[in-house]
Image (cartoon, helix red, strand yellow):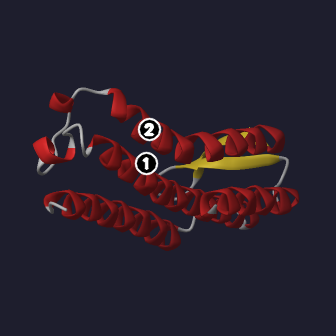
Amino acid sequence: MLLALLYFGFAMYVLWTIPQLPLRVATHFGLSGQPNNWMSKSEYLRFMGIFGFIFPFSIVGICFLVRFLPASAFNMPRRDYWLSPEHRGETFRYFLHQSLWFACMAVGFLAGLHCLLVQANHVSGGRLPLIPLLILAGTFLIGQIGWGIHLVRHFKKVV
């Protein structure tokens, strides 16, 4: 439910801010923060709509599909326990549940990235603000690390 609300909020936020963008949107920036690639506003809206849905949802899809892999494909704590026939369903339900949290983080990251692109396209010269970008990327990275640690800790224990 939370993921659906975040997707809806993200879509509304993008649609609300699209009018603030110029007809030619700076969408890629070099290390100096200067733009080096552009899209039309309609191309950007289409890209953000498609990528904004596919990127977070692909994590959920992958975590759903791993249930069809053999146990030997997994490198996880207590693999024999968690992938035994009596615990396999529980394990993959947990993977899927946790993937929804990861997808929520991804939607938040994309919303933050869109916000920075809107800001960059308002500034004279179209510079991407480096410090907010590093904070956004760092927060997303820390979230990914925390998510991974949480998974490992969960599977280290035997219920």
Residue 123, x across and y down, in percent: 71, 67
Residue 96, disc: 1
Q: Which disc number belongs to residue 60?
A: none
Q: Residue at x 25, y 46 (%)?
A: 87
Q: Nearer the viewer, residue 11 or 147?
A: 147
Q: Is residue 137 left or right of residue 33?
A: left
Is residue 61 or residue 17 the one in the foreground?
61
Asked if the residue under mark 2 is in contact with the one under mark 1, i.e. CB atoms within 8 Å, the reply is yes
Q: In the figure, residue 102 lies in which quadrant?
A: bottom left
Judging from the image, what secondary structure is the residue with disc 1 in?
helix
158 vs 103, left or right, is: left
Asked which quadrant contains residue 2, the reply is bottom right
Above/below status of 39 relative to 32: above
Q: Amino acid at mark 2?
A: Phe
| Quarter of the rendering containing residue 24 | top right
Compute the Cα span from label 1 to label 2: 6 Å
Residue highlighted by disc 2:
64
The image shows residue 4 at horizontal and vertical percentages of 67, 56
Image quarter hosting the N terminus: bottom right
Q: Residue furthest front?
A: 86
Q: Residues within 10 Å of mark 1 (few under 14, many from 20)?
A: many
Q: Position of residue 22 (x, y in %)?
A: 83, 53
Residue 113 appearing in the image: no
Along the line of sight, the residue nearer the viewer: 85 or 49: 85
Classed neighbour count for the residue bearing mark 2: other residues with Cα under 10 Å, few (<14), some (14–19), many (≥20): some
